[in-house]
Image: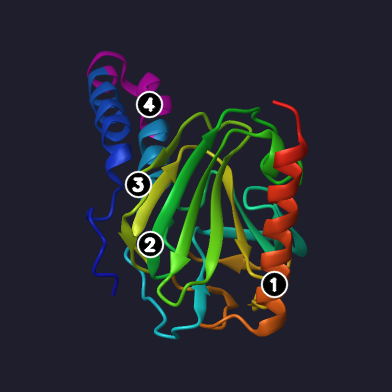
Amino acid sequence: MNRFYPHPLIAREGWPFILGGLLLSVLVSLCCGWWSLPFWVFTVFAVQFFRDPARDIPADPEAVLCPADGRIVVVERAEDPFRKVPALKISVFMNVFNVHSQRAPVDGTVTQVDYFPGQFVNAALDKASTENERNAVFATTKSGRELTFVQVAGLVARRILCYVQPGEKITRGQRYGFIRFGSRVDVYLPTDAVPLVAIGEKVRASETILARLPLEANGEQTVIETASALVQEAAEEVLPE
């Protein structure tokens, strides 16, 4: 089981909502009887939304684990918009009934964390990856492979929480963030990663393997990444300030 599971059954982000809903439900029940039903419905919803179950973690060293519960909405070759390199993009859409705790997909080190303000369009849409409020975590695996995983706010989400900092070690299955009320997580992997999920597939954080990423980059992959980095550096030099 996940030895990094920090909270018993309910994520700490949900405690104020659940306790507040429970208190109001009891008070309204004492005063108004059945008129308290909407408050009890809210309390039950809060309990199911903020549930945070422990998960089994695959031992495959090349496995990139799913960072969130939900449904796969993107599996494609694309550009990592943060690193400006070719990548395999896999996106997980979470509705309000999914577990919203995010968990680290690999063992490694966080190299950078960037927050970007933005809109709140439906997180199932492709444009959500570039237009919505989002938080990008850059990480490097123990063998030196680089990847980016991005928390994206959704239509009703208004709060992205991220608990890791640059320089911090992460372990697969470690809880690193939370998004409230409907959202998405994008994962950008090196192009030699092999996807193991398909669009429409339902996935579970830490238990589902998104892709298999070789521990070492092959020669072609190294050339592509180096060339992309040089092109980006040259473009930045010629752009006016």
Q: Earlier in the sequence, mark 3 or mark 1?
A: 3
Q: Secondary structure at mark 3?
A: loop
The three-letter amino acid code for the residue at tag 4 is Phe
Residue 194 to residue 18: above or below: below
Q: Is residue 37 magenta?
A: yes
Q: Residue at x 69, y 72 (%)?
A: 191
Estimate the x, y position of residue 223 in percent, counting from the top left: 71, 74
Q: Residues within 10 Å of mark 4 (few under 14, many from 20)?
A: many
Q: What is the C-alpha distance between the residues marked 3 and 2?
A: 10 Å
Image position of 190 (left or right of 75): left
Estimate the x, y position of residue 145 in percent, counting from the top left: 52, 71
The three-letter amino acid code for the residue at tag 3 is Gln
Provide the residue designation for mark 3: 165
Q: What is the C-alpha distance between the residues marked 3 and 1?
A: 26 Å
Along the line of sight, the residue nearer the viewer: 229 or 124: 229
The three-letter amino acid code for the residue at tag 2 is Thr
Q: Earlier in the sequence, mark 2 or mark 4?
A: 4
Provide the residue designation for mark 2: 109
Residue 24 to residue 136: above or below: above
Is residue 200 visible in the rendered image? The answer is: no
Q: Earlier in the sequence, mark 4 or mark 3?
A: 4
Q: Earlier in the sequence, mark 4 or mark 1?
A: 4
Provide the residue designation for mark 1: 191
State the image quarter where residue 106 is shown: bottom left
Task: Tell me which colouring the rendered structure shows.
Answer: rainbow
**Where does the C terminus fall, quadrant-wise?**
top right
Q: Residue at x 45, y 73 (%)?
A: 207
State the image quarter where residue 3 is shown: bottom left
Q: What is the C-alpha distance between the residues marked 4 and 3?
A: 37 Å
The residue segment tinted magenta is 28-40
Q: Earlier in the sequence, mark 1 or mark 2?
A: 2
The three-letter amino acid code for the residue at tag 1 is Thr
